[in-house]
Image: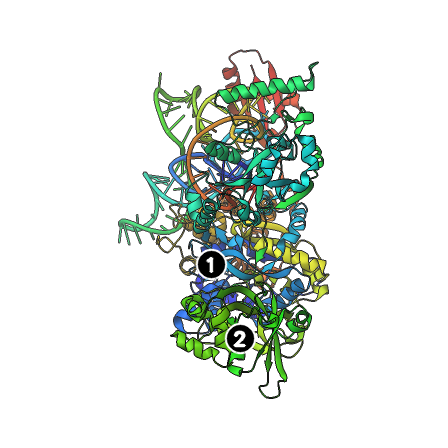
Amino acid sequence: MKKYDFKKIEKKWQTKWAKDKIYSANDFDSKPKKYVLIEFPYPSGEGLHMGHLRPYVAGDIYSRYLRMKGFNVVYPIGWDAFGLPAENYAIKHGVQPSVSTAKNVKNAKRQMMSWGLSFDWEREVNTTDPNYFKWTQWIFLQLFKKGLAYESTGLINWCPKDKTGLANEEVVNGRCDRCGTVVEQKELRQWYLKITEYAEKLLEGLKHLPEWPEAVKIQQENWIGKSEGAIIRFDIESQTDADDTQTGADDGQRKSASSRYESALEVFTTRPDTLFGATYLVLSPEGKYTKSFLSQITNREEVENYIERTKKRTEEERTAEGKEKTGAELKGIFATNPTNGERIPVWISDYVLANYGTGAIMAVPAHDERDFEFAKKFNLPIRVVLHEKAQAGQESIDAQAKEYLRVENKKKEDGEIFAGAVENGYLINSGKFNLMPTEKAKWEITKLVGGRKKIQYKLRDWVFSRQRYWGEPIPLIHCGHCAVPENKEKAKLELNFYYPEVWEALKNGTKKLETRALNPEEPERYFGNIKVGDSLLLSFKDKKTKKVKEQLIFRVKSSNTYKDISALFADKNAVVKFSNKKYSSVKELEKGYSYTPDYLERIKKNGLIAWEIEPVTVTIPVPEKNLPVVLPKVKKYEPTGTGESPLAGIASWVNTKCPNCKGDAKRETNTMPQWAGSSWYWLRYADPKNKKELADKKKLEYWTPVDVYFGGMEHTTLHLLYSRFWNLFLYDQGIVPVKEPYVRRQVHGMILASNGEKMSKSRGNVVNPDFIAGQLGADTLRMYEVFLGPHDMSVSWSDQGIMGIKRFLDRVWKLVNGETIERQTENPEAHKAIKKVGEDLEGFRYNTAVSATMIFLNKLEAEGATQKDKEVLVKLIAPFAPHIAEELWLILNPKAKSIHISEWPKFDPKLCVDESVKVGVQINGKLKDVVELSRDISEDEVKKIVLSLEKINSALGGSKVKRFIYVPNKIINIVI
RNA sequence: GCCCGGGUGGCGGAAUGGUAUACGCGUAACACUUAAAAUGUUAUGGGUUUCACCCAUGUGGGUUCGAGUCCCACCCCGGGCACCA
């Protein structure tokens, strides 16, 4: 007998399969298609680890099974190769990220080959390949053109270590998901994708995914976080008004005097039914309303201090402080509860979030725990307005309400003030709404106060720009010249420049400050009426001919007046912005002003005004024919940390011509996040080499949707959500044929070290799959990996346990190479095994499928195996252990083609059930004996047989049988 | 705090409301061997007064002829969200 030399066998077949391309899928094949997908890896320097092996093997086993079942299976692979590690490696070692990436890809590919994975290598994609990211950029442009990509300056999550902005989804417990650094809030210009516009569609889509795990759907649903509620308006009056109303105003007069209200604000609430219980309002310190009230309040300093304090505290500090409430009252202003006209105080507190709802809430302390905590701390009134029950009685509604209130007040006296949320209760203490059910009251009260229904989501827009080098450049161009025509009319002032150095400095942003002497006597030289936000038309003219050479629009960012040049000089901040040149003295500044004769005189007389200005540009998409926008090859990639991409410093790349006006323009320097390339890669697999479009529609129609997508739970609110969003968008544009990209989602648990801990380098407990494959073979590695436990559960690796699989394969080898017996009838054990393994594979219950093959082997070893038994056994293990199966198949059938394109064995359901079955006999539910009965025996016969059993008779001891329960082929239970 | 999972021998785990502990690991004895390894055979939930009985699926209740499985309450472990009004 030949020895089972796994090293030789595995190498041999890996080479042969690659050469014969037996795993390549044909487009438009007549066989029904199956698309099996795994999350493509990031090719890191570390290589692939156990965490990769698990889904890849799971996908591979399933693909191999489906191929044998007669499907045209595509099981593609690629590389998600943009991202920080490659860039950081490049910075450290001074190599191109593309070079280290290529090296890592080669290594990962070698690993995949050595594991016997049946990928279709002809469809390999790489997100960093210009032929690929051309289409990533193209999709971005479609989003941009539909208004779904926008630029905005705001507070975003900033990782100080990686020196880049992060999406909401990338922040976990206030830390950077990638490096664990505490995330800061930074005010930055960023590109966003309007994923919120798709919130409802993303939610709706989940309802049509019956083959997704509930846990995944629930997690996405919670992340989107839909709430239905109402927007309610509260009028705000200031102290002076309040004094007026003191003079005997009643409700009637209040209405007629409503014009006195200075302003109003809106709150979002899911419980408008509790409006009568709203005893104060709370605004977010960073929200839009707070600022506008500052001028009206009497304790401005205190409030500003609180706002400052909120800004300074990191997310972590806030969490560490727990739910201890802090806040400040906006003294001097009041809101009016629109239900009863009551004047209620307005507070600010950091428990109200600026970017959810309107950034303001109505507080109902009796029925909301957070409001209650706050009210308790600051001694604010608490009013109970809900009760769980309404009594159907003769009493009047008012009387009942009064009684409920009395009970609640009693509770209050006893110290139980908080009444709970009362989801399905009745109103009390709410005027004419008393005893109305809460659900009905929500809408009735909203109507009464002129509010409107509002659906609110927790989901935020996707921060889509990164200030790093190694990513897809955002294919946009900022043009100042194109901004001039439409803004020329709006310009408040035209300023002329004659010196090229000054003009250049203005254009490239090294000179940000423009000063003018104030001259109140002459209106055209006054300049004092230019305000922040105004546009200025700057003209560069020829000194002699006064002909305009170039014109650009600038916007005033800030404005300051100084009484003289020394005052300007004293403002260090201003001097830096004035020019890139360092002015060391007032004298030098004066020298700079001396080009106009009477200029210094005018400054001396009236002072000067200084505007911080920035060029106004129009964003122009790069024309499709100019895609892809590729990265410049440079030596330095270091992130700047200023919020600018390192690309911003590469003048030769940044400066370009505007595709619109052909004038000088600048490229957008932010790059896309790593999630961009993976948001559509499964589409590219359908047509990976297409030069004209991201993929041919016919091919997409054939291959998509993905039938099974294997991956990790950690991508649920990241990649899985993002890619659904892009797919839905592309579907709306008619580019892809299906709404939902993945029919079935299968998540895997972690592989833990033998002690149950996570595998990690620092713990020194990492099991290297390459080492195991080298020692025991890829077949053993694969089969053991799935045998460890259920695929969706975490499992612990065991070095001892894997020997069981090694022994199993050795025994299979021996059996197949050993004696072959003849048998007249079919072996029912084979049919049972085929049925069980097939069903388990369909349900991804790989561990029990493997155990079924073991049971089958045990039977064959005991009873002998025919040629057919051997063939069945080898086919059943083929998806798990493809190399040994292929070798044994060749031994069994020297002329046959590969086992992996052979037909999966069929089973006869009749042969899967035994003629007789062993049935347990219980007395009062306790097992006393086991009896073998023929399958179709009648209950009377069973009774006769069972009651004559010796063990049963002695156990009964003559007791009377009260009941005889016979569940055919399952159980017999005698009740006495 | 809220939302998902999960808790079964010494270990990984199996069980459409119907013989709990399949399959594998480990352990023990035996066979082969000068010996060891490998291999094979047998045994293996715990307890006891062992031809039998009792107790065991995180804990405590309940439904049922019968519960690991269904219901209620609680405990522990893993994951997610976290002041989202």
Q: Which chain is home to disc 1?
A: A
In the displayed structure image, the side of residue A912 where residue A114 appears, left or right: left
Amino acid tagged 2: Leu
Amino acid tagged 1: Ala
Query: Residue A728: image x %, image y %?
Result: 67, 56
Callout 1 environment at 10 Å: few (<14), some (14 to 19), or many (20+)? many
Disc marking residue A778? 1
Q: Nearer the viewer, mark 1 or mark 2?
A: 2
Would residue A947 be seen by someone viewing this image from the given angle? no
Disc marking residue A807? none
Tell me: residue A139, above or below residue A350: below
Q: Quadrant of residue A545?
A: bottom right
Q: Among all residues in the image, which is located at the extreme bottom?
A: A544
- Residues at marks 1 and 2 touching, judged by CB atoms closer than 8 Å: no
Query: Residue A527: image x %, image y %?
Result: 57, 69
Residue visible at 68% across and 38% down?
A257
Callout 2 environment at 10 Å: few (<14), some (14 to 19), or many (20+)? many
User: What is the distance, in whole Å, between disc 1 and disc 2 at their CAs?
Assistant: 64 Å
Tell me: residue A282, above or below residue A101: above
Query: Residue A401: image x %, image y %?
Result: 64, 20
Give the mark nearest the N terminus, 1 or 2: 2
Disc marking residue A506? 2
Residue visible at 56% across and 55% down?
A719
Number of disc labels = 2
